[in-house]
Amino acid sequence: MPHAQQALGADCRLLLPGYPDVLHHLAQDGALKPASPAFGPLFGAGRIQLLTGRMPGNGMSVIAIDAPWLYRRHGNPYLAPSGLGWPDNAARFALLGWIGAHIGAGDLIAGWEPDIVHAHDWHAGLTSLYLRRHPATAARTVFTVHNMAFQGRFPLDDGSALDLREGDLTPQGIEFHGELSFIKAGLVMSDWISTVSPTYAREITGIAHGHGLDGVIRSRSDRLSGILNGIDDALWDPSADRALPVRYSLADIEAKAINRRSLLSELGLHPDPQPQQPVLAVVSRLTEQKGLDLLLSSAHALLARGIRLVVLGSGDAAMEQGFTRLALEHRGRASVTIGFDEALSHRIFGGADAIVVPSRFEPCGLTQMYGLRYGTVPIVRRVGGLADTIVDEREGSAVRPANGFVFDDASPKAIIDAIERAQAAFADGTRWRRLIEAGMQVDLSWRHAAAEYLALYQRLNPRH
C-alpha cells in the first residue's frame, strides 16, 4: 500500500525492525546508510541505530531499526525455536513503537517530520500511546487491525520496563484482564482505527469477533472504518507469471487448461474423469480460524464425487496430520504439501478450478483475491473480507456480477452444499465462464485502498 500511496504523490517511509533478512536485502545495492547516531541502552538493547535503505523491487524508502540484541535472530520473527513467543517480545515491539513515536515527533530523522504515523496490528500498538504523551507533536495516528485474535498480551509487571506509567496500566488504559494489551493501546490511543475490510469493521464491534475488546471498539465506533486490502497485481498476474508453465489472460483463458493438466501431473493426481470434475485448491494456514477442520471433515465425501483436492500450507500439527492421512488414503485424488512454496502456490492458482476459503473469521483474505485474478473461482464463507469480495452465483446483479460461491454456516454440510453448487456450475461451461470473467475483471490492486487512506489522512491532518 505505501508504494501505491507514493504513486499518488505521498512521501511514505516504512519503519521495520532490523531482522537479519531485512538488513540483508536492504543492503543488496549498497545503499544502507546510517540515519541517526547510535544510541542506547533502551528496552534491553545496548546499541540502537536507525539505517535507511530502499525496498528491493519498488524502491520504497525504508527505515530499519538496527538493534542486534533484540532483532538479530534468524527464523521466525515472533517465535523462539521452542515454538513459543520470544520471552522479550514485549521489549522488542515496545522499541518499534517508541521509535515510531519519536520519528513521528520529528525527533530522530533529520529533515523529515511526518503528518501521519500509521501503525499496523499489536506489534506497533504502543506507537500511539507514546505519541499521545507528547501533545506538541502535530502528527496524527492511524491504527489498523489486521486480526483481532492476535493481541500482544504480556504480564502487567513488564510495564515499568517499557516506559509505561501507572495511568497506562488501568482498564481505562491498556490493561486487559490483568495483562498488558498492545492491541488495546492502538485501539484506545490512536486518532483513528481502521480494519482491512468493511464487513470486518462491523464484525469486531460484536462479541463473536471482538475477542473481548468489542466494548472498546464500540466506544470508538465514530472513529472506525473498514478499508479493503488489495493485492500486488504485478506479482499476481497470470499473463506475466513466470512460475506458470503457460501464461494466460482473460482473452486467452483456454490456456489455463494447460496449467491445469501440468498441475495434476506434477502432484501425481489422476487425469480428468468423465464427466470432468473440478480441481479444488487450498493455500492457507491449516488452522481452525481458516475453517479447514470443517473441510477436512467433508473431504472424504467430496473426493468420492470425483473431485480432486490440492492443499498447500502448514499450521496445527493435528490438522497437518489429518490432511496428510487424507492424501495417503486418496492417492491420485488428493495432494497435500505441508509447508510453503511460493512458486507452487502460483502454479496452484494457475491450474486449479476453484479455491476454497471456509474461514470461521477472515479480516480480509488474500487467497480469494488471487483466485479471482487467476480465474480460479472462490468458494468462501460469508465473513469479513470474503463477504466484501465474493458475490454468490445466486445473488449477482448488473452492479455486482456473481464471481463465486458463498455459504453461511460454519459446518461440513454448508461446505458440501456450496461445492456441489460449484460442481453443477462447472458442468455448465457457460455458467463457469461467466464467473471467471466477472472475477478476472475486478480491479484488486492497492490503488483504491491507497486513495481511501490518503483521504483519511487529509481529514485527520489537513496541513497540506
Image (spheres, rainbow, N blue to C red):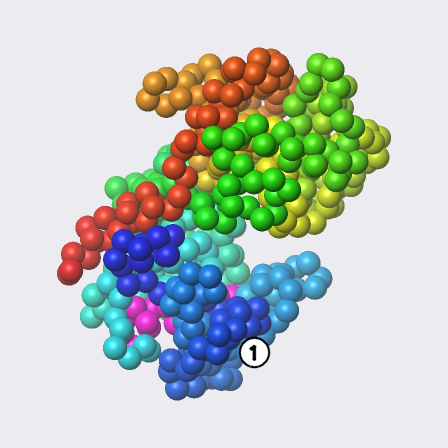
- Name the amino acid, label 1: Trp
Q: Secondary structure at mark 1?
A: helix
Query: Quarter of the image holding residue 286?
Result: top right
Q: Which image quadrant is residue 244 in? A: top right
Q: Which residue corresponds to the image point at 49% horizontal and 71% vertical from the top-left? A: 26
Q: Residue at x 73, y 46 (%)?
A: 338
| Residue 30 at least partly seen | yes
Q: Which residue: 64% across, 64% down? A: 75
Toward which corner of the image does residue 195 lie, by quadrant?
Answer: top left
Q: Is residue 398 rendered to the left or right of residue 371?
A: left
Magenta span: chief secondary structure: helix
| Residue wearing tag 1 | 69
Q: Nearer the viewer, residue 458 or 351?
A: 351
Circle count: 1
- Residue 84's spot in the image, x, y percent? 66, 59
Quarter in which the C terminus is drawn: bottom left
Residue 102 belongs to the span the image colors magenta: yes
Q: Is residue 278 magenta?
A: no
Magenta part of the chain: 90-107
Of 240 and 114, the residue lying toward us: 240
Give the vertical position of 143 relative to 355 (above or below): below
Q: Nearer the viewer, residue 306 or 221?
A: 306
> Vertically, is 416 above or below 292?
above
What percent of the width, then of the height, locates residue 129?
34, 63
Q: Residue, x 35% and y 53% (percent of image)?
A: 4
**Image x and y of residue 7, in percent:** 31, 55
* Label 1 CA crowd tier, 10 Å (few <14, some 14–19, many 20+): some
Asked if one can make out residue 229 in the rendered structure from this viewpoint, the answer is no
- Of residue 209 and residue 253, the one placed in the foreground of this image is 253
Return the x and y of residue 449 as percentages of the image width and height: 34, 45
The residue most toward the left is 463
